[in-house]
Image: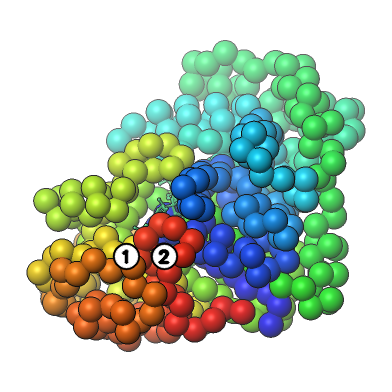
Amino acid sequence: MPALVLLGAQWGDEGKGKATDLLGGSVDYVVRYQGGNNAGHTVVVGDQKYALHLLPSGILSPGCTPVIGNGVVVDPSVLLSELSGLNERGVDTSKLLISGNAHIITPYNVTVDKVTERFLGKRKIGTTGRGIGPTYADKINRVGIRVQDLYDESILTQKVEAALDVKNQILTKLYNRRAIAVGQVVEELLGYAEKLEPYVADTVLILNQALEENKVVLFEGGQGTLLDIDHGTYPFVTSSNPTAGGACTGAGVGPTKISRVIGILKAYTTRVGSGPFPTELFDEDGEALRRIGGERGVTTGRDRRCGWFDAVIARYATRVNGLTDFFLTKLDVLTGWEQIPVCVAYEIDGKRVEELPYSQTDFHHAKPVYEMLPGWQEDITKAKTFADLPKNAQNYVKALEEMSGAPISAIGVGPGRDETIEINSFL
Ligand code: GDP
Ligand code: IMO
Ligand code: MG
């Protein structure tokens, strides 16, 4: 069973970085397949904390080859500074592979992201402002710049010209901004070419050959299921496919190769940016979850919106991703509540609804139907096995598993590598 996908089952920030790092030591390749530096994946190793944005979390495991797949959007300046930051901390990054087909986040994509958000005012998406949406828009409009274009100055110039032809009209006439000079963009991009060259590779070929040799490949999702452009809470989503199918298109690997899909699931719910969130709390409990869980964005530093666990969402994630397992994270954060509400269904316009409604209007009207589960007071951060957990914590996990539709195979009880209870092995 060589290929596994590990992805966010909610709205991102579920603890994908920690989970990936945990498996990093036992896999041969860790591949990012979508998104870009909108992601912020935290890995804690001993007393060291790393915040990764573009690099796959496998980069911290010496035996593992990190790969940036064709479906990722790459901001070269961010990538280079992330690499040098890790090098300064003694991490070897020389094995990194970057797909020549990955699209580049250009400076004008970042500008367009920021000005469109400003223009939207209170209807804004609350993007990370990293140029993600505009870069994927250029890809789909067939005016994108790819990593391989950095190695042909004439093609690069033609493509930047074509992209800026339209964008400068929009920037100057609609948004009242200054036009961006083609030459300046080309010069900046060419400045990255030589530094990136050692990493650029035919990642599709390499990954498929690795799979033929029975090597273990782990696909690390960015964002989460409900931020998926097709399956998320559109339009309050990111512009890529974090769901399992995205791993196939974003890395060039067929679905027949994937044997396990692991959903990372927080024991409560958080969301950054705008959009519906039925279990969101605006009271002391929400404040407590934010404080105890350290719920502040790794990329933008924004406070995360917090709420109780939503089983409707978890069931939906099981379905659209074909999840085989869950990795339940941050159970320790829930220690100390007398009772913990869990959303088991929604009430929409007076009717009880068990599954996520496909209609945006209905979802905006969804009110959580809660079931109260008894809490626990004991510190669980030292628990090593399921049996070490207090009875009520065990029951909370079992109840979530039953409602969510896939086995919970691991439980996080702290941010560190070893603060994990393994129930079923992933490999
Ligand atoms: P990602 O984007 O999915 O990788 O998640 P983030 O790194 O943005 O946010 C998850 C946060 O929770 C990070 O600060 C992690 O160090 C932390 N974390 C992960 N798993 C656990 C856990 O089981 N317990 C606690 N207390 N923290 C965790
Ligand atoms: P990780 O990988 C949480 C959210 C943004 C915004 C929406 C669109 O750390 O889980 P974008 O910049 O992607 O166009 O913004 O998506 N968002 C995330 N929220 N975790 C992330 O990544 C996110 N990446 C994007 O806040 O609402
Ligand atoms: Mg994150």
The residue indicated by pointer 2 is 419
**As drawn, is 342 to the left or to the right of 269?**
left
Q: Secondary structure at mark 2?
A: loop
Q: Which one is in front, 64 or 311?
A: 64
Residue at x-position 80% and y-position 26%: 190
Asked if the residue under mark 1 is in contact with the one under mark 2, i.e. CB atoms within 8 Å, the reply is yes
The residue indicated by pointer 1 is 381
Residue at x-position 56% and y-position 44%: 53
Residue at x-position 16% and y-position 77%: 373
Q: Which one is in front, 61 or 12?
A: 61
The answer to whether mark 1 is within 8 Å of ligand 1 is yes
Q: Which one is in front, 423 or 80?
A: 423
Q: Earlier in the sequence, mark 2 or mark 1?
A: 1
The answer to whether residue 333 shows anywhere in this view is yes
**As drawn, is 69 to the left or to the right of 38?**
right
**As drawn, is 87 to the left or to the right of 241?**
right
Q: Residues within 10 Å of mark 2 (few under 14, many from 20)?
A: some
Q: Residues within 10 Å of mark 1 (few under 14, many from 20)?
A: many
- Specify the amino acid type for callout 1: Thr
Q: CA distance from mark 2 to mark 1?
A: 7 Å
Q: Position of residue 150 (x, y in %)?
A: 82, 34
- Specify the amino acid type for callout 2: Glu
The answer to whether mark 2 is within 8 Å of ligand 1 is yes
Q: Position of residue 34 (x, y in %)?
A: 61, 54
Instruction: Quadrant for the N terminus, please.
Output: bottom right
